Image (cartoon, helix red, strand yellow):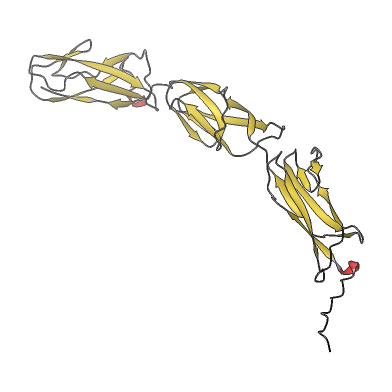
Amino acid sequence: AGPSTPSIPEPTPLEALTVETGVSDDAPIAGEPIQIFCTVEGLAEGQSPPATSWVVVLLPAGAQEPTIEGDMITFVSAGAYAATCQIDATDWVDPTPSLITVSPAAAAEIDTAVSPAALTAGDVATVSCTGADALGNAITEGWEVVATPGGLEVSELTLTAITAGTYDVACALADGAVDVTPAEVTVVHGPPHSLITELEANLIQAGDHTSLVCRAEDKQGNTVPDFSFSVAPLTLVEFVGFDVTSTTAGTYVIKCVPGDLGEWSAFVLVSDLLEV
């Protein structure tokens, strides 16, 4: 007897075939084409797959229609999509569509708003960041805030005013995109909090003189100008304006106080020591 002829498997009936939906990238950025492919399941060995097709079954509200060329699709609008395959001869549809999440492309426009933009040291402001890619998709996450020069404390989308001055505040993204027209923020000093005494020399000979400087600062350390000072009187120390002298050896606490010698407890008094 001659050699046996291998048996050819019977083809699977069309009605018994199923199809799976696949995508080359399930998280593309807007404007980036991806491939959608249909894989027929249940084929017998050597059996040719039947014709398949696919359709987008879920689009975000208000989304622009994607562009389709062959088995490639390009999404214009960001959002969540779904696509599913079917076997054309039997209308059998994949019951588990492939989900596709489209993100905005690189920012083409960034805008920064700060409220309020005029601050007193210690105040807190809120930064609002808006942006869009070249296709008009809004960018709603991933924002960072850049403030220059230093002097504003940044925490996520809030600013705390520390140092008096004028600042540029710009929204930015991790890919390096930044608002090229930053918002301007101005900070002025707060009310006086600390009265600081500084002697030109802390050690003098009896009968010699030194000078002192009185300075007012707010809670953030900013100088408060035009504050009226006096010096706390001492029995063995003579003050002539802000000139200090003594003829008696000892260590003396020199302390700047409010100019009207009024309520000292409203301020933190930072004294200096004079040794004669």
How many dots with numbers?
0
Point 44% across, 25% down: residue: 149
Image quadrant in which the N terminus is located? bottom right
Image quadrant in which the C terminus is located? top left
Q: Nearer the viewer, residue 140 or 48?
A: 48
Lateral position of residue 147 relative to residue 63, left or right = left
Q: With respect to residue 122, does 211 lie above or below?
A: above
Q: Quadrant of residue 231?
A: top left
Q: With respect to residue 104, does 230 lie above or below?
A: above
Q: Nearer the viewer, residue 246 or 16?
A: 16
Residue found at the very far bottom of the displayed protein: 1
Task: Estimate the x, y position of residue 199 in percent, counting from the top left.
Answer: 21, 20
Task: Estimate the x, y position of residue 43 in percent, counting from the top left.
Answer: 82, 68
Point 71% across, 35% down: residue: 137
Lateral position of residue 244 relative to residue 139, left or right = left
Residue found at the very far top of the displayed protein: 240
Task: Estimate the x, y position of residue 206 in percent, counting from the top left.
Answer: 7, 17
Q: Quadrant of residue 107?
A: top right
Point 82% across, 39% down: residue: 65
Lateral position of residue 260 relative to residue 90, left or right = left
Q: With respect to residue 76, does 216 lie above or below?
A: above
Q: With respect to residue 161, does 50 lie above or below?
A: below
Q: Nearer the viewer, residue 222 or 12?
A: 12
Point 57% across, 24% down: residue: 180
Task: Estimate the x, y position of residue 213 in percent, counting from the top left.
Answer: 25, 16
